[in-house]
Image: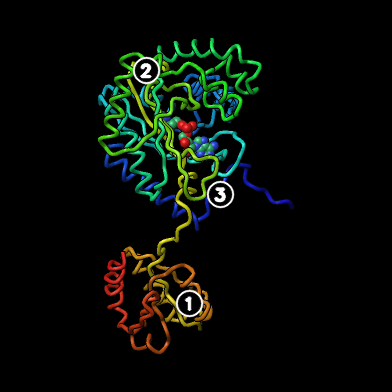
Amino acid sequence: MASISAVKGMNDILPKDVWRWHHIERVFQDVAATYGFREVRTPIVEPTQLFLRSIGEATDIVEKEMYSFVDKGDDALTIRPEGTASAVRAYIEHSVHADEPISKWYYLGPMFRRERPARGRYRQFYQAGVEVFGDAGPFVDAEVIALAVRILEKLGIQDIEVLLNSLGTGDTKARYREKLLTYLTPFSESLSPDSKRRLGTNPLRVLDSKIEKDREICQNAPRLHDVLTDEDRAHFDSVKNVLTRLGIRFREDANLVRGLDYYSRTLFEIQGRGGELGAQNALCGGGRYDGLMRELGGQDLPSIGFAMGLERLLLAMGESKEPQSMDVALVVEPGNAESDLRLDAAAFADSLRALGLRVESDLRGQSLKSQFRRADRIGAAFVVLFAGNEWKSGRVKVKDLAAHAEQEFELSLVPQHLLEKIAGKK
Ligand code: HAM
């Protein structure tokens, strides 16, 4: 019978690789906690309306990429393409603002977009994101960007560039949209098909087209920064000042728009260049979305956040060796399957685990050679050898595999010895 493969663009993460994911998740959680962020978990499936009203109907995500379906109860549902909309929905639904004026949330989990799969671009991918509700900035804008940079630094991702822009408030954005439309409309026949289409729906997106001809046309387009109000400008200047004071390097990019409609004012993207990253080099994207809460039926509360793609972080980090995964492998002289030797070894393994040690025991009666090979393969730090002769006098050998050292002990003294040695190695 033909075998079944995973859905295109959706990947298995096998146990041999999961440690990398745990590492990233732990670093993200630890650094986010130092900034006062707490985890939120929201459903993976949401009403389709949520994304139409937040991400925007004229975006690539909503137009082409959402996994939407009507369930058996005739509800229109979507498997989430991102986490911000859900976080805002949950914040409103649980009236969180009544309990705390400022909330700092983070989330980790899979997102789904039906994009064309490529290195660093998948249909199921994992995001680690943060959202802050109730603070209009500019200090928090810089703090959120700093948090993203510190996480990347902690992961050893050095070769990054922070791109920064300001879109102004919703009103500014609307005024700019009109200006841009007036400028671009005469060029509409020369624009790429995608940009031509966007002209009618979301002209700001034409600005971040990657097509050479579109870029040329955009070079003389009116600049958003020219229509920023004094307040928008003062906010943006303050964000830049604080970032400079925090030692965060950035580059202003007036064409940075990003593909979601809800943004206003501060917008940023962190790109990576190292490791095995290819064209999909956006490691992290985020910004302010001060109008979204009201748009989704909540209070008029300012908000800002970002999300980073875990697969891309892994690519940027490159290869590294799995840290020691097992503490102890028991190696037991083969012989009678139900011998007291094997029973003692099973009980001993159990007692070590109760002390918190990671212990593998192969009690199938394999040859000593194959058991030692396995100990090596699983990365055990120590081997405890149960061999008939020593065992009869209540003794076992303990081998430190890295140090190539071996010592014989009375069995009852081994747990303490291992605990001390292993604590010393960590
Ligand atoms: P986004 O730019 O769509 O923003 O996604 C954020 C990050 O998720 C990207 O920079 C990238 O690392 C990763 N990512 C996106 N799509 C894919 C994909 N198909 N495959 C692999 N990785 C991908 C958002 O999602 C916003 N919700 C971020 C945000 C939070 N803004 C404010 N708060």
Q: Position of residue 174 (x, y in %)?
A: 45, 12
User: Residue at 50% of width from left, 58% of height from top?
Assistant: 16
Which tag, 2 or 3, sits closer to the chain's start?
3
User: Residue at 43% of width from left, 18% of height from top?
Assistant: 224
Q: Is residue 136 left or right of residue 383?
A: left
The answer to whether any part of residue 111 appears in the image is no
Depth order, front residue of 276/147: 276
Report which quarter residue 83 is drawn in: top left
CA distance for labels 1 and 3: 30 Å
Q: Position of residue 312 (x, y in %)?
A: 49, 44
Q: Within 8 Å of ligand 1, the CB of disc 1?
A: no
User: Residue at 35% of width from left, 40% of height from top?
Assistant: 149
What amino acid does circle 1 point to?
Answer: Phe
Q: Secondary structure at mark 3?
A: loop
Q: Position of residue 201 (x, y in %)?
A: 56, 16
**Mark 2 in CB contact with mark 3 (< 8 angstroms):** no
Q: Looking at the image, is 329 positioned above or below residue 95?
A: below
The answer to whether any part of residue 3 appears in the image is yes
What amino acid does circle 3 point to?
Answer: Asp
Q: Which mark is residue 372?
A: 1
Q: Which mark is residue 12?
A: 3
